[in-house]
Structures are given as structure tokens and as C-alpha cells.
Amino acid sequence: MVGQNKSNKKFIAFTGPGCSGKTTLIKRLDFSKFLKGEIYHINSHTRELKHKGFPINSEGSDDTQIMITLKHFENIKNDLGMNCIFDRCVLDGFVYTKWLWRKDQVSNYVKEFAEGVYLNNIEKYNIVFYCIPDFKYTKDKDRDSNKQDIEIIKAIYDEEIRILENILYTKDTRIVRLTGNVEKRKRVVENELNKFLWINPLR
């Protein structure tokens, strides 16, 4: 079935709040050292939606979160037949939808839709690296959340990651927390990929 055969392709995801170092870290990693064959990088699509006129982040709406959830669903169901590196995953779509739902900016059905896509597909990733934002937040034109919202988003991530660590404890999907500077995170990722591929060799 499409998107479900982990033995043929590896799905490595990076998750975490905005400005938690995901994109910077991904750019510093040479995944070809660990993954045989073609590697497809799937970038965050939030800015792409903004350019199409959808309000994002603190201005998010039902339409925005539905589109984001559908993009995550499409990405995890891809039939490219190659290893994929995800800058954000189904967890991110749910966390931000849950945050906006708490702010009464999205409907309950949208929150439930995002949650369903998240819970039904999180195990399709082989490893989920959780980038913890333990450094100073940098604001830019696409990241307009205030300090209180930033803390709420982080708290939702922490809560969901703790739940996942318990749910996936006996499953094939690994949750790995990343802290510290880029070099420290890079070393942890490389060690985890080495360990993972030693236990689960590519076929």
C-alpha cells in the first residue's frame, strides 16, 4: 500500500515550534551518508500557503488549517518510492490547529480532522526528531506570534510529545528530542540515524 511500506523507504521527520532550528539543522545534515538511493526533501508549506493568500500563524483560519492538514496527509501518503526528509509533519499540523482552536479561530470539526490525520499517520514516520526551542526566539515577517502564544504552542508540543513517547514506546517509530546548539543536535541526529540503520538496514 502507498506510504506504508517502511522497508522500502525511510521517512525522517523534524518537528517543533517555529524558530526551533529545524530548517537550519536539516541544511547542515548530509542524509546521503545514511540513506541509500534518492532522497526527497519535503519543506514546510506554510509560507507557500501565505503566498497563495491564506492567513497563517496567529491569523490562521479553518481554510488554512484544512489546507495544511491536507498537505501533510498528501506528503505522508506519497508514492515517490524514495527516502523522504520532512521539515514539519502531521504533528505540527495538529499542534497549530489545536492552538488556534483554543483561541476560537478554528472550528471543532477542523481540530478533530487534524487530530485524526495526525493520530492515524504518525506511525508512518520512522524517526521523529523533536527540536526543542531552547534558544532565543527570533521574530520575522512570517512568525508574528506573541510571547504568550509562543509559550502555549511549546506547551502543546511538549504535551503531545510526552503522549507519543508513551504510545509509541513499543512501536517502530522513534521519538528523539533535540536540544542545544546546531552542532550538538547534528551529532545526535547522525548517531540516531546510524543506530536506526544498523537495526533496520535498508533493503
Image (spheres, rainbow, N blue to C red):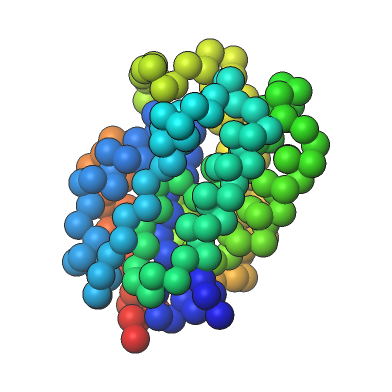
How many labels were placed on the picture? 0
* Visible residue check, residue 197: yes
Image quadrant holding the N terminus, namely: bottom right
117 or 164, which is in the foreground?
A: 117
Q: Hey, which residue is sitting farthest bottom in the picture? A: 203
Q: Which residue is painted at 20% across and 65% down in the image?
A: 32
* Visible residue check, residue 131: no
181 or 33, which is in the foreground?
A: 33
Q: Is residue 41 left or right of residue 55?
A: left
Q: Is residue 170 left or right of residue 82?
A: right
The picture places residue 78, in percent across and down from the top left corner, at: 47, 66
The picture places residue 165, in percent across and down from the top left corner, at: 60, 55
Q: Which residue is painted at 24% across and 75% down in the image?
A: 37
Q: Hey, which residue is sitting farthest right in the picture? A: 108
The picture places residue 89, in percent across and down from the top left corner, at: 50, 50
Residue 38 higher or lower than 149, as above or below: below
Q: Which residue is painted at 56% across and 56% down in the image?
A: 73
Residue 32 higher or lower than 101, as above or below: below
Image quadrant holding the C terminus, namely: bottom left
The picture places residue 84, in percent across and down from the top left corner, at: 37, 62
Q: Which residue is painted at 37% across and 46% down in the image?
A: 43
Residue 85 higher or lower than 156, as above or below: below
| Res. 19 image quadrant | top left
Residue 196 higher or lower than 167, as above or below: below
Q: Is residue 28 left or right of residue 80?
A: left
